[in-house]
């Protein structure tokens, strides 16, 4: 089974995967908004790093769910 097929199944059948994916997308948008700024304040830079770490954690969790499904 292809990864895309597994992702489709998880989106339809796994509430945890769906929530994680939605949160990952929300963080991606927040990161894009921050990265559009020419200069970041120290607080914005800290927030940017925090978002990057959270986003990576969600991505890792999604990958784990995909592996577990296989």
Image: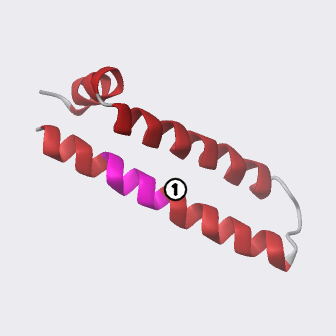
- Residue lying furthest bottom: 42
Name the side, left or right, on which 49 lies relative to 56: right
Residue at 46% in and 60% down: 56
Residue 21 spot, x, y in % from top left: 46, 39
Q: Secondary structure at mark 1?
A: helix
Magenta-span inclusion, residue 63: no
Name the side, left or right, on which 27 lies relative to 36: left
Q: How many marks on residues?
A: 1
Residue 69 sits in quarter? top left
Residue 66 spot, x, y in % from top left: 23, 41
Q: Is residue 53 above or below residue 17?
A: below
In magenta, the rendered stretch is 56-62
Name the side, left or right, on which 40 lies relative to 26: right
Q: Is residue 23 above or below residue 52?
A: above
Check disc 1 and report the residue beneath it: 55
Residue at 11% in and 27% down: 1
Label 1 Cα neighbours within 10 Å, binned few <14 / some 14-19 / many ≥20: many
Q: Is residue 8 above or below residue 23?
A: above
Magenta-span inclusion, residue 59: yes
Q: Main secondary structure of the magenta part?
A: helix
Residue at 62% in and 42% down: 26
Name the side, left or right, on which 70 lies relative to 65: left
**According to the image, what is the colour scheme of the structure?**
secondary structure
Q: Quadrant of the C terminus?
A: top left
Residue 49 spot, x, y in % from top left: 64, 70
Residue at 78% in and 56% down: 34
């Amino acid at each position: 089974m292809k990864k895309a097929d597994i992702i489709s199944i998880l989106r339809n059948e796994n509430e945890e995967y769906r929530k994680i994916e939605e949160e990952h997308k929300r963080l991606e948008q927040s990161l894009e908004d921050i990265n559009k700024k020419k200069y970041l304040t120290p607080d914005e830079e800290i927030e940017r790093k925090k978002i990057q770490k959270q986003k990576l954690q969600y991505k890792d969790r999604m990958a784990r769910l995909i592996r577990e499904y296989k």
